[in-house]
Amino acid sequence: MPQRFHMGDVPRLGGAALLLGLACAWGLGILQSFLGDPGSLRLGWWVGSWLLVLLPAVLGGIAEDMTQRLAVRYRLALTGASGLLAIFLLDLSVPRLGLPWFDMLLSVCPWLGLAIVVLAVAGLPHAFNIIDGYNGLAGMVAIIVCLALAHVALQVGDRSLAALLVTTAAATGGFLVWNYPRGMLFAGDGGAYVWGVVIALASISLVQRNADVSPWFPMLLLIYPVWETVFSIYRKAVRGVSPGVADALHFHQLIYRRIVRGVFHDDESRRVLMRNNRTSPYLWGFTLLTVVPAILFWNNTLVLMGFCWLFVISYVVAYLAIVRFKVPDWLRR
């Protein structure tokens, strides 16, 4: 298929391992909290609701990984079901966006905040699935984002949310042992949906619980996978192609084809693996360019919005430069 850049048979059940790791870690956190809570994590039975919210999306992703026959519309419906469960079980809503006129609209029409929750929980898993193209790419982005969210959660005293995010990063780190650089295990749709749903829930919860946190803080953290998805839908629509059709024109795929230098090796599968591994660090650096200002200005909406627009412009300029073969030589080294 056009989006695959590996050779040989590789298991795609990394998502099942991630889900099991989270269930064990969160269960242990609940147990510790009931036995005296030595870490002041305050993890109660509400954490089980997070797992219930995860299940429709992640189980659908795992089913696709095992069968390769679950259509995109059904997977989108299952992630949407997770979004609805987030509203009913976790009482999530988006109370503000940092824009006075829109915040006034949200106060008059609170259902808009609920719609944003469903959109975020349903859409972000698919955004992570889109960038999950090379060994270590989506996993490392997930770790960076989780730790950045946990850092700000600790800044505002939300230790329970920080604990859920740190354990998600830890489970992802265990997965990366097998995924990067050897590519012995793939996250699959299930893994991408774990990252997407957990990070969406954490982002909305952080903003909803803490008035000091700008809603544009998680947006800047996630602008790379979000804009990759929006831009992909746009360029496919221009060509009259369905957004659900896979292709090989994503940003990370262009970097693989036109920036990462060829590797000379007698074994073809080894050659593909080495080029695959050299692609992800380019995108890790690209992600850090948004994470650093997000952490520095997590409570300044105007600055965060400015960096979001700067990323969008930089992305489009870089994409066009790669397409037109106008890439500086030093990027190819």
Image (spheres, helix red, strand yellow):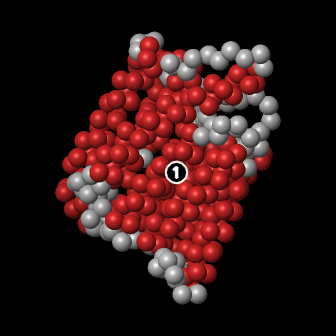
Quick one: 220 or 170, which is closer to the camera? 170
Q: Secondary structure at mark 1?
A: helix
Res 187 seen here? no
- Outermost residue on the right side: it is 9
Kindly identify which residue carries mark 1: 143
Q: Is residue 287 above or below residue 34?
A: above
- On screen, residue 148 versus residue 68, left or right, reads left
Name the residue located 23 percent from the left edge and 46 percent from the top edge. Answer: 303
The image shows residue 227 at horizontal and vertical percentages of 42, 38
Q: Quadrant of residue 215?
A: bottom left
Quick one: 241 or 61, which is closer to the camera? 61
Q: Is residue 125 above or below residue 42?
A: above
Name the residue located 74 percent from the left edge and 25 percent from the top edge. Answer: 270
Res 35 seen here? yes
Q: Quadrant of residue 278?
A: top right
- On screen, residue 252 versus residue 96, left or right, reads right
Name the residue located 51 percent from the left edge and 45 percent from the top edge. Answer: 141
The image shows residue 157 at horizontal and vertical percentages of 36, 72
The image shows residue 100 at horizontal and vertical percentages of 19, 57
The image shows residue 111 at horizontal and vertical percentages of 37, 64
Name the residue located 68 percent from the left edge and 15 percent from the top edge. Answer: 264
Q: Amino acid at mark 1?
A: Ile
**Number of disc labels:** 1
